[in-house]
Image (tube, rainbow, N blue to C red):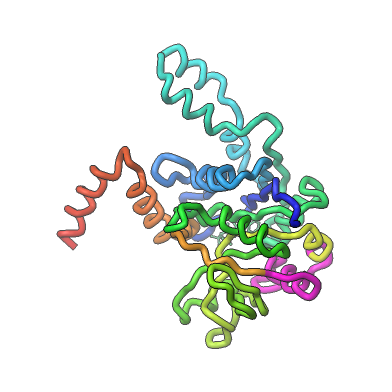
Amino acid sequence: MSQRVRKAIFPVAGLGTRVLPATKAIPKEMLTVVDRPVLQHAVDEAREAGIEHFVFVTGRNKAVIEDHFDMSYELEDTLQKRGKTKEYAALMADLPKAGATSFTRQQAPLGLGHAVWCARDIIGDEPFAVILPDMITLPGARKSRCIAQCLEAYEQHGGNIIAVEEVPEDETHLYGVVSVKQDFGATFEIGGMVEKPAKGTAPSNLIISGRYVLEPQIFGILESLEKGAGGEIQLTDGMKKLADMQKFFGVRFDGRTCDTGSKLGFLLANVHFALEREDIAPAFKAELKKIAAKL
Ligand code: UTP
């Protein structure tokens, strides 16, 4: 039986150059989708899936992320004194338990593989999840979000798990791509993987979409990894090496994934997440229809 996955790494040390100037003074993970920071949506997803410890790999100018997951004494006191009990209760419900968060710093943005490696001592010798917080997800027919489906697959298959998504063939060169060895439907065994394949050389149109469950042996590999695509230490290159020793399985997430790290993805995320919100969806839909009618 596979070990329970208790911890998740959230790499949040990237520079967010695709959404400048918004990210000049504000970490991109703190931009809001509806009324929650992008990162809060990712943490919500992890909590729903039973993750107990949240490990943030931050960088310079990201201190506000720590504050977001801490108490805000003055604010909470004021809310209580003014009788804003609903708002106060909502803040308290979001607050992680004492000791359930860890923060470590990636001193320079050397790549996702390096960011994950920075969390090695906090994770220790147990399987863990990696959640790229700029990709945020909404449930589909199976009513669960992406990391929950990855954890289910991990219970079923063991090994290492990667969530994937289909993209048009002419976009595969922008992503990490996997190939299918044995197909089980919602999940499959991965045959191989490649980071940003040259146009026309991708082994499939299934891209790595920002959720992983990995065995701790990845850390030893990442430690000695050379720089890869884009001059960065790539997690995909580390996983490729681990795949020589351990199995990897893909998960076809049945819900929606929004990439808030790009301008268009960020706008679409706001639309999709707002449409799922009972409190604002009716009024928002009506406004959207008016706009759409004029397009
Ligand atoms: P991205 O490439 O999407 O993030 O990395 P970025 O570098 O912030 O964005 P752009 O391309 O400049 O706009 C995917 C995830 O990995 C993290 C990012 O914070 C993001 O969550 N990351 C990336 C790190 O933590 N460290 C790195 O060195 C690189």
**For this view, does 154 lie left or right of residue 256?**
right
Q: Based on the displayed image, in which of its 4 quarters is residue 60 positioned?
A: top right
Look at 69% across and 65% down and name the residue there.
Answer: 235
Residue depicted at 50% across the width and 45% down the height: 41
Residue 26 can be seen in this image:
no
Residue 260 position, x and y percent, is 47, 56
Residue drawn at 50 percent across, 29 percent down: 91
Residue closer to the observer: 78 or 242 = 242
Q: Quadrant of the C terminus?
A: bottom left
Magenta stretch containing residue 148, yes or no?
no
Task: Specify start and end residues of the magenta stretch as a single range.
Answer: 222-248
Which quadrant holds residue 63?
top right
Name the residue furthest top: 81
Q: Position of residue 177 (x, y in %)?
A: 59, 75
Q: Quadrant of residue 225?
A: bottom right
- Residue 212: x %, y % from top left: 64, 60
Quadrant placement of the N terminus:
bottom right
